[in-house]
Image (cartoon, grey):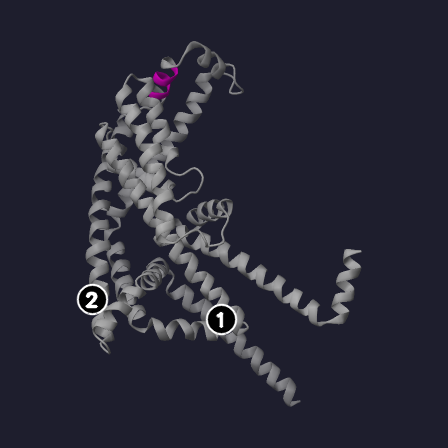
């Protein structure tokens, strides 16, 4: 009777924990993004906090405040300045799209007309039926993508009050996560309903992937976007900063990356007679933008995160589709924890098979 009662009480307590966890998630759902980025910032800048703490031993509040000040001055303020400039350029692009000053159908027609006759015939005789049909479809997709990008940038300005509230909450939480992170992290790992070794392994993988994604992919993408914006500005492309931001976003995708942006631009410039501009874009894309990843990524994080490129691509795209900007980190983290979890399960089954004679016989029978 006592055992039954104990099981009922344990089950009731687990049910209570599940319900209160769901309730808390619903309560803070409006600030999920801010809390996520606060945790990521605290994790990424924890080494800086530790260095400041060694400079002022015992003064954790001061070290956390100085770290937060450095984050604000070095990261937040420049980011807000860039965002404001992007919003201005996005407003201009959106207005030109609505008035017809930017017409992707015209641009594709110019490129088509500048191609050699043999290539034009090959394009027209391809599976699209006719170049005009393909042109309409591609133009509609390009116009829709540009409009969505412009409207998204404009919505940031329209929801400035909500953004500032979430931003303030994020900074406030970051301060406490920096100050108390050494206690919070191990406490969370110990509280996980997993074996201690498994929980620690998953936590280590989480930290490694987060740092790799932000320090590696994030910083490299920003550098490539900045180089792209400078290149577009040099050749006189309108809204160069806006397209540089787009390049930074697509640079998060392995295999394809910034080439999705600078390649069409170079083709258009060459096809419309802007020869030196097109050559500059190609040289910059291949020799400068393309090599930035190969040079910077090994220096920042190395290539030992254990995630194949195809999984990074799929999880990043899926994360962005599900959670927006936060999905850039959440997607690869979910993929990494998935792989790690199955690796742990496989290792545990192998260990049990090595120590259990019956399991070894069953494994032998299965192979036979």
**Quadrant assignment, res 181:** bottom left
Give the mark, 2 or 1, whose residue is nearer the N terminus: 1
> Is 217 placed left or right of 355 in the picture?
left
SS at badge 2: helix
Quadrant containing the C terminus is: bottom right
Q: Which residues are magenta?
A: 107-112
Q: Nearer the viewer, residue 312 or 102?
A: 312
**Quadrant assignment, res 187:** bottom left
Q: Nearer the viewer, residue 152 or 266?
A: 266
Q: Nearer the viewer, residue 113 or 70?
A: 70
Quadrant containing the N terminus is: bottom right
> Is 31 placed left or right of 13 in the picture?
left
> Is 13 placed left or right of 268 in the picture?
right
Q: Position of residue 317 (x, y in %)?
A: 45, 45
SS at badge 1: helix
Q: Position of residue 71 (x, y in %)?
A: 24, 59
Nearer the observer: mark 2 or 1; the answer is 2
Report the residue at 33% width, 39% height from top.
Answer: 246
The residue wearing badge 1 is 19
Report the residue at 25% width, 75% height from top.
Answer: 60
The residue wearing badge 2 is 66
- Asked whether the viewer can see residue 325, the reply is no
State the CA–CA distance, disc 2 to disc 1.
38 Å
**Quadrant assignment, res 226:** top left
Report the residue at 21% width, 39% height from top.
Answer: 88
- Mark sitting on residue 340: none
């Amino acid at each position: 009777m006592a055992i039954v009662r104990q099981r009922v009480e344990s089950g009731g307590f687990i049910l209570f924990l599940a319900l209160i966890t769901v309730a808390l998630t619903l309560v803070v759902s409006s600030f999920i993004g801010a809390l996520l980025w606060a945790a990521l910032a605290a994790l990424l800048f924890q080494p800086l906090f530790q260095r400041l703490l060694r400079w002022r031993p015992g003064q954790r509040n001061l070290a956390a405040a100085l770290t937060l000040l450095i984050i604000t001055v070095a990261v937040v303020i420049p980011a807000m300045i860039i965002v404001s400039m992007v919003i201005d350029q996005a407003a201009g692009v959106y207005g030109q799209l609505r008035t017809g000053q930017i017409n992707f159908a015209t641009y594709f027609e110019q490129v088509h007309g500048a191609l050699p006759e043999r290539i034009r015939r090959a394009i027209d005789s391809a599976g699209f039926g006719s170049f005009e049909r393909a042109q309409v479809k591609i133009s509609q997709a390009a116009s829709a993508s540009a409009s969505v990008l412009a409207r998204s940038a404009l919505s940031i300005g329209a929801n400035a009050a909500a953004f500032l509230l979430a931003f303030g909450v994020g900074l406030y939480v970051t301060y406490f996560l920096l100050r108390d992170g050494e206690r919070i992290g191990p406490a969370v790992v110990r509280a996980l309903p997993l074996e201690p070794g498994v929980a620690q392994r998953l936590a280590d993988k989480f930290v490694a992937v987060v740092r790799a994604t932000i320090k590696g992919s994030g910083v490299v993408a920003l550098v490539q976007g900045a180089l792209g914006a400078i290149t577009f500005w040099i050749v006189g492309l309108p809204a160069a900063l806006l397209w540089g931001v787009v390049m930074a976003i697509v640079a998060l995708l392995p295999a394809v990356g910034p080439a999705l942006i600078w390649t069409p631009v170079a083709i258009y410039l060459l096809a419309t007679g802007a020869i030196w501009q097109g050559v500059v874009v190609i040289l910059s894309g291949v020799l400068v933008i393309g090599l930035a990843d190969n040079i910077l990524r090994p220096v920042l994080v190395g290539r030992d995160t254990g995630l194949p490129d195809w999984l990074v691509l799929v999880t990043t795209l899926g994360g962005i589709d599900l959670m927006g900007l936060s999905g850039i980190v959440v997607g690869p983290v979910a993929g990494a924890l998935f792989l790690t979890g199955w690796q742990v399960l496989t290792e545990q089954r192998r260990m049990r098979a090595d120590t259990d004679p019956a399991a070894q016989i069953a494994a032998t029978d299965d192979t036979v």
